[in-house]
């Protein structure tokens, strides 16, 4: 017997929307991946074409997060289960 999750994966794959569904998980996982402190100074605007757009409260936070971006991308994609987030754009 298959689980509901397996059924949904097969369904999404058959429709060709599996990548979009995986990509759509990124905004909801942001706070969990970056932690409480960073989450308090940021908010996800959305994701398009593999680029996650995140609003940052200040220029100093934007600078700090720029250097943390490779690690955040790694953790985010690991949590999603595939490399769907290709980049993060920090905006003010």
Image (cartoon, grey):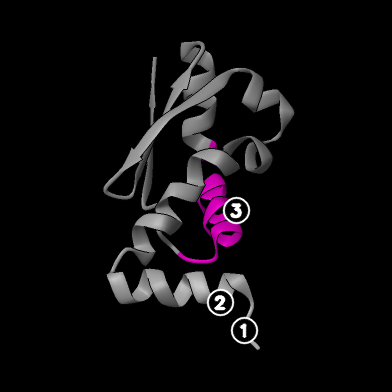
> Which mark, residue 6?
2
Q: How far apart are labels 1 and 2 at the CA level?
A: 6 Å
Marks 1 and 2: CB-CB under 8 Å? Answer: yes
Q: Position of residue 64 (x, y in %)?
A: 54, 26
What residue is pinned by disc 1? 2
Q: Which residue is rendered at x = 49% and y = 46% of the image?
A: 26
Q: Secondary structure at mark 1?
A: loop
Secondary structure of the residue carrying tag 3 is helix
Magenta residues (range): 68-82
Q: Is residue 48 left or right of residue 26?
A: left
At a point 60% along the width and 71% down the height, the residue shown is 4
Q: Secondary structure of the magenta portion, mostly?
A: helix
Q: Nearer the viewer, mark 3 or mark 2?
A: 2
Please indicate whether residue 76 sits to the left or right of residue 53 in the image.
right
> Looking at the figure, which quarter contains the N terminus?
bottom right
Q: Residues within 10 Å of mark 1 (few under 14, many from 20)?
A: few
Q: Are marks 3 and 2 in contact (CB under 8 Å)?
A: no
Q: Which of pointers 1 and 3 lies earlier in the amino acid sequence?
A: 1
Q: Is residue 16 above or below residue 54?
A: below
């Amino acid at each position: 017997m298959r689980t509901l999750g397996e059924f949904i994966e097969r369904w999404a794959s058959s429709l060709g929307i599996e990548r979009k569904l995986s990509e759509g998980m990124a905004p909801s996982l942001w706070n969990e991946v970056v932690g409480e402190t960073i989450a308090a100074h940021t908010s996800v605007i959305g994701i398009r074409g593999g680029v996650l757009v995140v609003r940052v409260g200040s220029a100093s936070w934007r600078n700090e997060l720029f250097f943390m971006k490779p690690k955040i991308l790694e953790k985010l994609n690991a949590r999603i289960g595939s490399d769907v987030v290709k980049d993060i754009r920090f905006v003010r």
